[in-house]
Amino acid sequence: MFVSPPCLVTISYRLLFVALILVILPNEICGGARTPFFDLTAYSDWPQFEDYIKGVAHDNPSFVQLKQIGKSREGRPLLGLKIGKPSKDGKRKIASWLDGGNHAREWPAFHVAVYFIEKLVNGYLIDDKITKYVDTLDIYVFPILNPDGFVYSRTSTRAMIRQWRKNRAPENCTGTGVFQTDVCCVGVDLNRNYDIGFSQSSYPFNNPCSDEFQGPYPFSEPESRAVRDFIMSSEIYGRLYALVSMHTHGQLWILPYNYQKRTYPQDFKDLETLANRAAEKVYAYRETKYRVGTAADLLGTATGGATDWIKKNTPTKYVYVLELPPDMKTWFAFQVKPHWLIPIGKETWIGIEVILDQVIEETKDFKPTESTADSTADIRSPRFRQL
Ligand SMILES: [Zn+2]
């Protein structure tokens, strides 16, 4: 059919108009926000994580905020995202927390945290379940709580470096080795540095040359202090209802407490019941079998753990550590082949959904009286504790 030149002009103007609308309209109105590219089929380095986290916040200002809770020993930012559409009336929302842990070599956990960000941000206003999470909750995601250790572990394939676990605290020369004393060693195990069950005499946690060195005193490290201070801050204290910290490996759904055997919080049954439900759902997906219990009972005691301290010192109810695949049969399998990252992300998310659904169910009658301008005094009210 013959199309006159003026008509062609009209068509191109229309195309231009449509293109402009697509660019100008907020992403979510057009059906789904977008995240910067992050390759989850390979292991990425710290700069990619940093750019990605900042990029997600930058590109989705209507429901994602960048959170820097502190700096590492070497000055790297401790970065995360607050994913949650602000409530229409400006009231405080219930919050949940997902992190990739604080052990340098446990790369899959960091990447699975990115998978969660992808899921939440790209699914918003597309997937009903995700939309409900983002509208109802504030979900904080912190992919890496030990960037210095991670960067160091990426610098060499030598086992001593690739399998680095601690942060990069300066040398402490009170270490012991085989038939040696006063040995100098670098680093503190951030997951032994919290003030719970901390004892100067507990071996090997008191040995700076141990992989599990607890540090010279509780909260000696800026990374653990940053988490403590943020957890206790008026921004989330009293409204944080669930926290899941991911590690590798072992396929364990770890409950508090772990600083000594057969020691449990009052509501342990609730935590255990929910963890069992989540583990069953994960198993149904591709038969990844998680064991549920305290690490103290299943493996052995570990003092100074982040989640133990959080459960003991805050009203946050559901507090877990997930030891991601593979199971414990393989020795030193902290870094699965990267083609497993997405399958592990998918199945782990199924478990996270169980947690988030329960959070929403249990807190649906929560009637916050606070505006987003936080007040520590009021959010510590008994009202929340009764939920
Ligand atoms: Zn770990």
Image: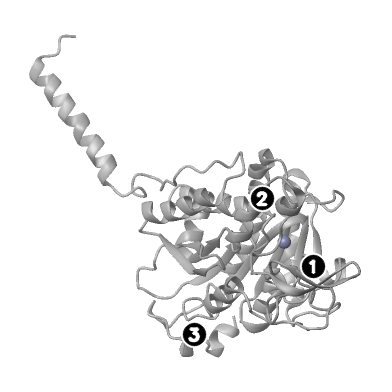
**Is 190 left or right of 82, judged from the image as shown?**
right
Residue at (52% x, 75% y) in the render = 230
Q: Are marks 2 and 3 in contact (CB under 8 Å)?
A: no
Quadrant of res 304? bottom right
- Residue under circle 3? 379
- Quadrant containing the C terminus is bottom right
Quadrant of res 100? bottom right
Instruction: Decide: few, some or many residues near mark 2? Use Cα within 10 Å; few <14, some 14-19, many ≥20.
Output: many
| Nearer to us in this view, 260 or 27 | 260
Q: Is mark 1 within 8 Å of ligand 1?
A: no
Q: Secondary structure at mark 1?
A: loop
Give the image location of residue 195, x and y in percent.
Answer: 69, 82
Residue extending farthest to the top is 1
User: Disc 2 residue type?
Assistant: Pro
Q: Secondary structure at mark 2?
A: helix
User: Disc 1 residue type?
Assistant: Ser
| Nearer to us in this view, 220 or 172 | 172
Q: How far, Cα to Cα, is label 2 from label 3?
A: 35 Å
- Residue under circle 1? 210
Label whose residue precedes the other's in the sequence (1 or 3): 1
Q: How far, Cα to Cα, is label 1 from label 3?
A: 40 Å
| Nearer to us in this view, 252 or 170 | 170
